[in-house]
Image (tube, rainbow, N blue to C red):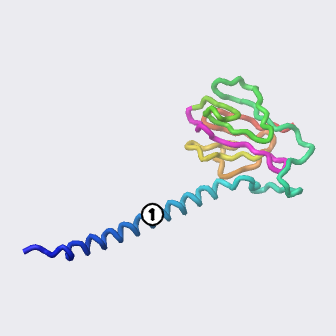
Amino acid sequence: MSLPLADLVEPVSVALKFGIVAVLYLFLAWVARSSVVDLSRGAVGALAPGVHDPGGDGSSAAGTGEPRLRVERAVGHQPGDEYDIGPGAVIGRGSQVDIRIDDAYASGRHARLVRQAGVVIVEDLGSTNGTFLNEEPLAGPQPLQLGDRIRIGDTEFTYLDD
């Protein structure tokens, strides 16, 4: 005594429908999570917390010195070496960065420095091991002050703007 084919197809059809709905919900959850992560990193062109743009155009304010980083300790660099930041710079272990560091704890594109409204902002680019500002983990874009220390793994820089 065997079951008719129609009696076997109906449960399989229902299971496939539930499977498709489950995959759809997983996809939507993945999209929502990705959006939240991207938004928490900060939008490109947005001002960091605590930075005001008096002109409203994102240009640098006059009267500041040239921002630069001084090496305190880094493999392959001499302490005291300085790097001009210019309008911005990317620090990392990769070949397509402005300031290359040979640090096992650094990502290919680890951190970014950007000038906004006359202030230099430091931002972690989603690195695995994080970026530290004055020995505190960097949580979102932060404005730099004269003498701030940026640490990536065993590499440390001091921010200068005079």
Figure check: 54 above or below 118: below
The stretch of residues the image draws in magenta is 104-119
Q: Position of residue 7 (x, y in %)?
A: 20, 76
Q: Is residue 25 left or right of residue 137?
A: left
Residue 111 highlighted magenta (yes or no) = yes
Q: Position of residue 96 (x, y in %)?
A: 65, 34
Q: Quadrant of the N terminus?
A: bottom left
Q: Quadrant of residue 90?
A: top right
Q: Quadrant of residue 8?
A: bottom left
Q: Quadrant of the C terminus?
A: top right
At 45% from the left edge and 67% from the top edge, which residue is drawn? 25
At 68% from the left edge and 24% from the top edge, which residue is drawn? 77
Secondary structure beneath label 1: helix
Outermost residue on the left side: it is 1
Q: Nearer the viewer, residue 48 or 9?
A: 9
Q: Nearer the viewer, residue 162 or 59?
A: 59
Q: Is residue 119 left or right of residue 125?
A: right
Figure check: 89 above or below 22: above
Figure check: 123 above or below 79: below
Q: Amino acid at mark 1?
A: Leu
At 61% from the left edge and 34% from the top edge, which residue is drawn? 94
Outermost residue on the front side: it is 5
Q: Which residue is mark 1?
A: 26
At 69% from the left edge and 33% from the top edge, which residue is drawn? 99
Q: How many marks?
A: 1
Q: Position of residue 92 (x, y in %)?
A: 64, 36
Figure check: 127 above or below 51: above
Q: Position of residue 135 (x, y in %)?
A: 66, 42
Residue 115 highlighted magenta (yes or no) = yes
Outermost residue on the right side: it is 63
